[in-house]
Amino acid sequence: MSGSTGSLDLGSVENQDVFIQPVPLAWQNEALLARGQPDGGLSVSFQGQRQSAGLLTRLLEYCAVTHSPEVKISGDDLIGAVAEGSSVQFWHCPQSRSIKKPTRMLKKTVCYQCESQEAAENAAARVRQSSSWSASSSPPEIAVIINPHSGTGRAADCYWNVVKPIFAAAGLSTVEHTTTHAGHAPVIVQQLQMHGLRAVVLVGGDGTVWEALQGYMARPDWKEAVQVPLAQIPAGSGNALAANANTWSPVTAAWAVCKGKHTAFDVFSVVQPPAKRAFGFLSVAYGMITNLDIGTEHLRWLGPLRFTYGALQQILLRKSWSIRMAYYPAELPAPHYRGSQADGPATPILDRIDREAWTPNDHASNLPEGWHWVPTDQVQMCVACNLPWLDLENNVAPHASFGSGAMDLVYTSELQRLQGLQVLLKASDGTHLNVKGVKLLKMRAFMLEPRSSGTWLAVDGEAIPRERVFIEVHPRLCRVITA
Ligand SMILES: Nc1ncnc2c1ncn2[C@@H]1O[C@H](COP(=O)(O)OP(=O)(O)OP(=O)(O)O)[C@@H](O)[C@H]1O
């Protein structure tokens, strides 16, 4: 590799990654030779001075004396670069070792000295564009909503100290909004200029995602708006959307936003007249699960540990709650709907039943065609999951998936304490479904009628009135950024 002062060699590179279309990327000068790789990655060799000290520098110096002065960064890992004066530094997010929950860590190369400030800025701009702009000539625009109340109250720190520097190195154009009160996120989302946005990034927990979803669906242009993916930076207590998107840590989620890969996922309508229809993305829970979540709100300072504490308490108490529930099974096709959807997505299954006819004391009444009763009138755990992970730790519905068009009802009626403990211990890998007494049903729509006090009815972890509720899944309606 010869260094010819100031010359810029624009070689072409092939695009082998569907999400990254590398621009031709190769330039060289006396100090720095960086070559675009076929996978969109970067091979950097330093022929001039190196700046900055630290372990990484010393390691690289070691490489230099052992005649392998090249740093190779894969296109998948590379996210951008930072230029300062006439030096440039490349940022990348390689996978860390954990295989169970793949996360990424942030790494920065040493600062390479270019021949001029312009050369350094040029180098940084090229790397950003090739690694994080999906071949666009202008930077992707991102709306960020930060809930400073989420989790243990560190969401804002997490964003400004960890995530924002990554977005800046990737050259993303961000506009930040910080919520000032509960219920603020839907207002922010309704006012966003969605056209052209790469993503709406939510820094917070699932309550923030839930609120943002209400904002999406309340927009007159909801059909177009839902094409803009959501992303969750896991900074709350539960962080289920991030878990299900395989973005298990703030750095991993930030990296995923830089890469911009997204997929469709189901959401569901929550119909509980006379209240306005709401929308959920995660779960409908009654009994034990709500007690261990909403019932431990006063222990927020414990972080995710509060759920473990709450679960142990519920298992030992061994309480059960009265319920009546009917469902439209996943095996049956969803009826077709052809009407206008100006007021939100249609609910063809719920529209075919007479919801008023289901009187509270009428367990034996005839069900509409295709519907079945859930065969119990008493539950301990009762949670209908739209996604497998209910938080970063618990894979409660391992057979659920992003776009299945169905929710998995996981429930128990008469678990002993020992079985309850087994469920708690096995929920992290989904094997709790094998514990005797744990039942699973797949449903496209359902009616849940809570009949006990002393517990909550909750959608996505948010309490709703403890009254009869009708749910219908909307297959693949929204989009989410994934790793
Ligand atoms: N500035 C604010 N002050 C107080 N509360 C807020 C503010 N902004 C948002 N909220 C409320 O904070 C609640 C909790 O936020 P969020 O759900 O993100 O965190 P969490 O409860 O820790 O996480 P998870 O829902 O994943 O368990 C939301 O229901 C939201 O209404």
Image (spheres, rainbow, N blue to C red):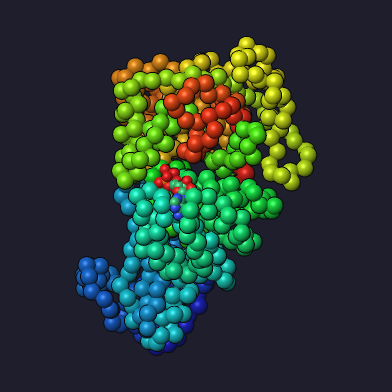
Residue 331 lies, with reference to residue 113, above or below; the image says: above
Q: Quadrant of residue 435?
A: top left
Q: Quadrant of the N terminus?
A: bottom left
- 357 relative to 261 in the view: left or right: right
Find residue 317 and report its horizontal and vertical position in percent.
33, 22
Residue 64 lies, with reference to residue 335, above or below; the image says: below
Q: Residue furthest right?
A: 339
Q: Is residue 100 visible in this depiction of the protein?
A: no
**Residue at 49%, 50% in the rendered image:** 182
Q: Is residue 273 visible in this depiction of the protein?
A: yes
**Residue at 35%, 40% in the rendered image:** 298
- 206 relative to 471 in the view: left or right: left
**Residue at 68%, 50% in the rendered image:** 223
Number of marks present in the image shown:
0
**Residue at 47%, 30% in the rendered image:** 456
Find residue 81 and report its horizontal and vertical position in percent.
41, 71
Find residue 309 and report its horizontal and vertical position in percent.
30, 34
Find residue 84 and report its horizontal and vertical position in percent.
37, 79
Q: Nearer the viewer, residue 108 or 165?
A: 165
Residue 82 lies, with reference to residue 281, above or below; the image says: below
Q: Nearer the viewer, residue 359 or 260?
A: 359
- 186 relative to 254 in the view: left or right: right
Residue 52 lies, with reference to residue 42, above or below; the image says: below
